[in-house]
Image (spheres, grey):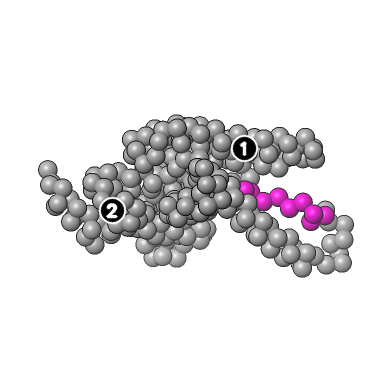
Amino acid sequence: MFSEEVLDALSRTPALYGAALVLGALLGSFASVCVYRIPKGKSIVSPPSHCYGCNRPIRWFDNVPILSYLLLGGKCRSCGARYSPRYLLVEVGLALLSLATYHFCVELLHPFDPTPLKLARFAVYLLFELCLVVIALIDLDHMRIPDRITYPAIPFFFGVGLLLRDRPWTDGLIGIAVGYGVVRLISDGYYFLTRREGLGYGDGKLLAIVGGLLGWRAVVMSLFGGSLFGSVIGIAVVAWRRRKRTGDDAEQPSLRHVELPFGPFLVLAALMYLFLQDTLSVALRAFIPVI
């Protein structure tokens, strides 16, 4: 067994930072499997990775995150089928996110906590980020957030949040209730007024995951930040589509109502809150002093 001093020193070495980077890349590869299989109702563990062009199994040396994609030029060795560049982007993105999360947990968030608690917090936050990235990509592809992810994730992250003891257990329960309840009210109210679907209940379940782990303040800031990001990007998309339209497109449907998945914007805002939670909580108290 390592002593606390040795473990603390070891946690700050380049080797552990490198391990965090590799772990993130591996989870990025796993995330792409989840994004492809979960919406189809397939198992995420069986069968093993295979080419979706020729259906041949991918050998282990062709399945090394990031490196295999670069060495093979983004193609299957057997049939030459091209793989989407998003596979590479997800692996690189999660590798960098894992590295940033490791440094955040070990050095910045609660620097005087015991090292085992810091490492446990890193593991929980990394799983949380994996879950959010998978949800965001599925929502981007299919405009829906699967219950297969959200239903088990809500109690899981609430439970591990209790073990970390970073906030009172009531914060998690309130976060779950507020996350789902607010979106449910907005969604039902919008449908009642317009007879069109707006926010989906999946967005509420996503916010319940966020609230279960990070508390109700995270829900408030995620909803605010997600709405801000969605508005800015939505306006940009509308402007771009209007510029693309020509006289021959006059009979196309109106661009007044542009459908964009809200999940990715909520995820982006939730990840920002994760890293800036102390700063954003102080900012929130400036507007609502009683919290």
Q: Is residue 236 left or right of residue 20?
A: right
Q: In the rendered view, does 159 fall on the left or right side of 196?
A: left
Q: Amino acid at mark 2?
A: Pro
Q: Which residues are magenta?
A: 254-264
Instruction: Find out whether residue 171 is within the magenta segment.
Output: no
Please identify the residue farthest to the front as the structure is shown.
290
Residue sitting at x 72%, y 65%: 240
Work out whether 73 lies above or below 201. Answer: below
Drawn side of residue 286 relative to residue 110, left or right: right
Q: In terms of sequence position, does the residue under pointer 2 or pointer 1 come before the other?
A: 2
> Can residue 110 be spotted in the picture?
yes
- Does dot 1 land on a helix, a strand or a loop? helix
- Within 10 angstroms of label 2, few (less than 14), some, or many (20 or more) residues? few
Can you give x and y, in whole percent of width and height, for residue 27 in the image? 39, 49
Disc 2 to disc 1, C-alpha distance: 35 Å
**Dominant secondary structure, magenta:** loop
The correct choice, above or below, for 50 with respect to 18 in the image is above
Instruction: Please name the residue that numbered disc 1 is placed on.
Output: 182
Left or right of 29? Residue 137 is right
Question: In the image, what residue occupies the spot 28% across and 53% down?
Answer: 111
The residue sitting at 87% across, 61% down in the picture is 250
Residue shown at 37% from the left, 34% from the top: 162
The residue nearer to you, when weighing 177 against 86, is 177
Q: Amino acid at mark 1?
A: Val
Where on the picture, by quarter, is residue 64? Answer: bottom left
For the residue pair 22 and 188, the one nearer the viewer reads as: 188
Name the spot of residue 33 as percent of width and height, x first. 46, 46
Residue 61 numbered tag? none
Q: Nearer the viewer, residue 29 or 208?
A: 208
How many marks overall? 2
Helix, strand or loop at mark 2: loop
**To which residue does mark 2 refer?**
111
